[in-house]
Amino acid sequence: MPTASRAMTEFRLFRGADRIDALSPADRAYAYGDGVFETMRAHRGELPWWDRHWARLRHSAPRLGLILPEEDQVRAEAQALLAGEDAVLKLILSRGEGGRGYAPPAQAIPSWTISRHPLPPPAPREGLTLRWCDLRVSLQPALAGMKHCNRLEQVLARAEWDDPDVHEGLLLNTDGELVGATAANVFMLRAGTWLTPPVDRCGIAGVCRQALIDLADIQVRPLNAADLARADAIFLCNAVRGILPVARLGERQWAPHPGLTGLRRRLGSSHPAFAGLDD
C-alpha cells in the first residue's frame, strides 16, 4: 500500500554543494525571480519522471545562464527527504546571491532548494469546472516553455476567483490564443484527434504534457476559445495530478469521454502514481 504523506512541508537548502540553514536575502530568485523550478510527483519515495524533469531543467538553465548543481547529489538528497513516501517534491534552482541591480553577477554560486509537500486532494470524479481568466499572458519566446520563477501572471490569474466550485482557470495570450490553465496544460478532442496548443511563444512545456505527446497521437496546434467550445472532450494535465477530465466550462458541459481511458492507461504505464485512475 502507498504510504501516507506527512502533513508538514520540509525543506533542504544548498549553496553549491554545501547545505545551508537559510536562504540569503540577496538571493536572486527571491529578489528577481531569477531561477527555475520543477514540481514532481513521488511514488513510494521514487521519482518515476526524474529524467524528464532533469532534462527540462538541463534545457532551461542554460537559456538563463544558470549553473546546474550535480544531478547525483540533488537526486540523493531528494530521495532522502522523501523517505519512501508518496508526496510532491519541489526543486528550485536560483542563480544565487547578487547585489542590487538586474545585472547578473559574473561568478554567482547557484543555490537550490528541495521541499517535500503533501499530495493534493483527489479531483472530483465527475470532472473539473473551469472558468476563463481575464488576464492575458504576454508573449515572450525567450522565456517560453520553461518553469522560471516569475509566476506573477499565474498568481494574478488565480486571484480572480475564490469560488470553491471552480477548480481552474484557462488563460489566453495577448493574441487571443489558448495558453493553458493557471497550473496545467490543456488538451481537447475534436473529430477523433487530440490537440494541445504550442508553447513556443509563451506557456509551460509541461512534463506530463510531453509524456502524453510521446505516448499518444496528439497534434500541437494553435487553439482559441471558440475551438474549446466545439470540443468533444477537454482535459487538463500536470506532473503532480496526471490527467484531469473537464466537466464544465462556462455554459458548456461534457460527460465523461471514453477516449480518455486509453490515455490514462498509457500515462499510468509511464508513472505508477497515475495507474488505475481510469477504473
Image (cartoon, rainbow, N blue to C red):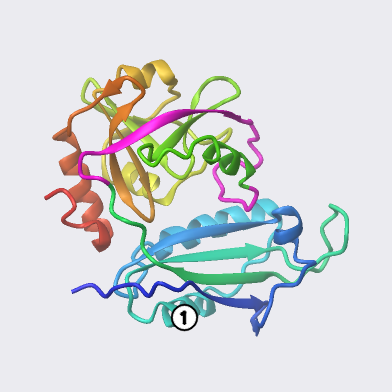
Main secondary structure of the magenta stretch? loop
Instruction: Give the residue pinned by disc 1.
Output: 76
- Name the residue rendered at 32%, 19% in the picture: 251
Q: Is residue 151 magenta?
A: no
- Name the residue rendered at 37%, 68% in the picture: 87
Q: In this picture, which residue range is highlighted in magenta? A: 124-150
Residue count near mark 1 (Cα–Cα under 10 Å), binned few <14, some 14–19, many ≥20: few
Q: What is the total number of numbered labels drawn onto the structure image?
A: 1
Q: Residue furthest front?
A: 163
Q: Residue furthest right?
A: 100
Q: Is residue 231 above or below residue 106?
A: above
- Left or right: 256 as drawn, with respect to 122: left
Q: Residue furthest left?
A: 279
Quarter occupied by residue 220: top left
- Name the residue rendered at 29%, 45% in the picture: 243
- Name the residue rendered at 43%, 20% in the picture: 225
- Left or right: 94 as drawn, with respect to 106: left
Quarter occupied by residue 174: top right
Q: Is residue 252 above or below residue 130?
A: above
Task: State the image coordinates of residue 140 (x, y, percent, origin top left).
Answer: 65, 35
Task: State the image coordinates of residue 201 (x, y, percent, origin top left).
Answer: 58, 33
Task: State the image coordinates of residue 248 (x, y, percent, origin top left).
Answer: 30, 29
Task: State the image coordinates of residue 209 (x, y, percent, origin top left).
Answer: 38, 44
Q: Quadrant of the N terminus?
A: bottom left
Q: Is residue 135 magenta?
A: yes
Q: Is residue 270 above or below residue 213?
A: below
Q: Is residue 269 above or below residue 27?
A: above
Quarter occupied by residue 274: bottom left
Of residue 41 and residue 249, the one placed in the foreground of this image is 249
Amino acid type shown at disc 1: Ala
Secondary structure of the residue carrying tag 1 is: helix
